Image (tube, grey):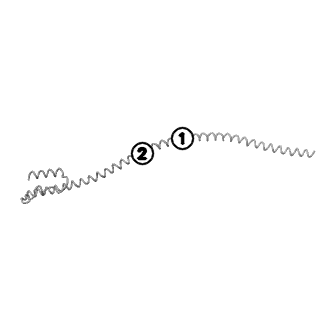
Amino acid sequence: MTSAILMDVVLGGLLAATIFYTTRLYRKMSELKLYQQDLQQLAAQFTRATETAQQAIGVLKETTEQSGGLLESHIRKAHTLKEDLNFMNDRAASLATALEENIKEARKAKNDLALLASTIAGAKKTPAVAAVATTETLKPVRRGRASKAEAELLAALESRG
């Protein structure tokens, strides 16, 4: 009988330990169920956030494509304007060079006319020089095309001479 009592005590102890661990397990399972609900809510929020991010990425891609097309259009226009400005700059440089040459020629013609006018004025004062200063000797020094003023001056000299 002592072995039966001993067996009952051992079984009673094991049963008490099982009840203790079962109670503890039940509490942990209850906490896990609470955390499970929180985890499910967190997973649902994460899913919504992921969907929102995917939508935002789609909108961002669309906006990027539109902006890229607009930027490309502006770049093409800017390139065309750059080419036009380079052409205009080259033309302006060549026109400035031509204008500078024309100004030099006009100044030279003015000096030639002033010299011619002073020669004529001096020729009128001295009869000996007047006889030598004919229209042949008073032709402009400048070769090539004569300006309108030079042509008129020569015509006036020829009509007097």
The location of residue 27, given as percent across then percent down, is 74, 42
Residue at 37 percent across and 48 percent down: it is 83
Residue most extreme to the right:
1
Q: Residues within 10 Å of mark 1 (few under 14, many from 20)?
A: few
- Give the label on residue 58, or none: 1
How packed mark 2 is, by other alpha carbons closer than 10 Å (few <14, some 14-19, many 20 or more), is few
Relative placement, left or right, of 151 versus 64 is: left
Q: Which residue is mark 2?
A: 76
Residue 54, quarter of picture: top right
Q: Which residue is at 6% across, 60% downward?
A: 128
Q: Nearer the viewer, residue 111 or 138?
A: 138
Residue drawn at 49 percent across, 42 percent down: 65
Q: Nearer the observer, disc 1 or disc 2?
A: 2
Amino acid type indicated by mark 1: Gly
Residue 6, position in %: x, y? 89, 46
Amino acid type assigned to the residue bearing label 2 in the image: Arg
Q: Residue at x 10, y 52 (%)?
A: 158
Determine the CA span between mark 1 and mark 2. Answer: 27 Å
Image position, residue 62 (x, y; %)? 51, 41
Q: Is residue 46 above or below residue 125?
A: above
**SS for dot 1:** helix
Residue 31: name its quadrant. top right
